[in-house]
Amino acid sequence: MDIQQATTQITQATSLKALEDLRIHYLGQSGEVTKQLQALGQLPPEERKARGAELNQIKTQLQTVITAQKTKLEEAELAAQLAEQAVDVTLPASPHFVGRIHPLTAAMEEIAAALKTLGFVHAYGPEVETDDYNFTKLNLPAHHPARQDQDTFYLNPFNTDGHKYLLRTQTSNVQVRTLEAHQPPFRVMGIGRVYRRDYDLTHTPQFHQVEGMMVEKGTNFAHMKGVLTEFLRLFFGKSLKTRIRPHYFPFTEPSAEMDMECQACKGQGCRVCKHSGWVEILGCGMVHRNVLAVGGLKVDEHPGFAFGAGVERLAMLKYGVPDLRLFFESHAAFVQQYGKPPVAAS
Ligand code: DAH
């Protein structure tokens, strides 16, 4: 066996596979060196020792060369891999979009924050409601004509528990539920989804309302006007002008509607306000005695006021959203344009 030749072969191996083949060829179980070591026993005893020492030295030498070559090849392979996977840090980064808060969500958060400042706390009413809570207990008995103003989605007409179920047409059910469950004084707000069978440019079958009710000894119409004006100023801005007009709602007496100065033209008159300078913004009134009676309250002892407004309308006027349907079409570009930047994570 030519040790010189073996060493040359090993140092010239260009792959780990070729190197392993050479190792097997020389040092493997039936490799050349191994075979010679195994044949030592057949040598005459006087030659055996010297030959044995020589073969072991060859074996160690080849092992050393193989290990060195292996390290060299592995390093080369790693270097090649790194070169292949190298990242060009001078390339421009891929675009990075930060999501925005949907204008409806933003509006509901801002409405709640404004009302919270004025002492209102969240109250609840279900979206699947009985006509008792949606109408009757709000002073709209079975054949009251105003029921027809709110095109109602009725559910399971064949229910057996004696209740007529529907999708609530207004958040005013929150009033009834609060009156039944709590003792005054209270200031509550209910913000959520409502449903009506209506679909055109300015109506969607599902939309959102905010409802408020304050019942407290000594509450009067002037308190209502003050609280609602302050609410709108907190939401739209300090200098907002408001006015109040008589109106009719079955659940309040007296009832009113509040208008605010058109934000698009600052009261000058434009398309948004139909050139009047004012836009209608909420319904309100002193809680009707028949409604208070649901909670066992008397109008002379525990007067209160209530109000209701459309969240989409508030959001459209505040953020300048031109079309109601945009809220429900899930276009990312809409949220990007009219949404609110998220609060930066700290
Ligand atoms: N529920 C009314 C509607 O959907 C809005 C409303 C008006 C609510 C006057 C009230 C209120 O609480 O006092 O049109």
Image: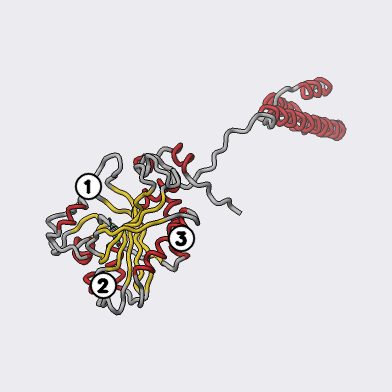
Question: In the picture shown, does residue 89 fall above or below 118?
Answer: above
Q: Amino acid at mark 3?
A: Ala
Foreground residue among 136 and 34:
136
Q: Amino acid at mark 2?
A: Leu
Check the picture and name the quadrant holding the N terminus.
Answer: top right
Q: Are marks 3 and 2 in contact (CB under 8 Å)?
A: no
Foreground residue among 133 and 17:
133
Q: Earlier in the sequence, mark 3 or mark 1?
A: 3
Instruction: Tell me how far mark 3 sits from mark 1, CA to CA.
Output: 31 Å
Q: Measuring from the top left, give residue 308's x and y in whole percent.
A: 33, 58
* SS assignment at label 2: helix
Frontmost of labels 2 and 1 is: 2
Foreground residue among 80 and 204:
204
* SS assignment at label 3: helix
For residue 197, the mark is 1
For residue 292, the mark is 2
Question: In the picture shown, does residue 185 fall above or below 338?
Answer: below
Question: In the picture shown, does residue 301 fall above or below 32?
Answer: below
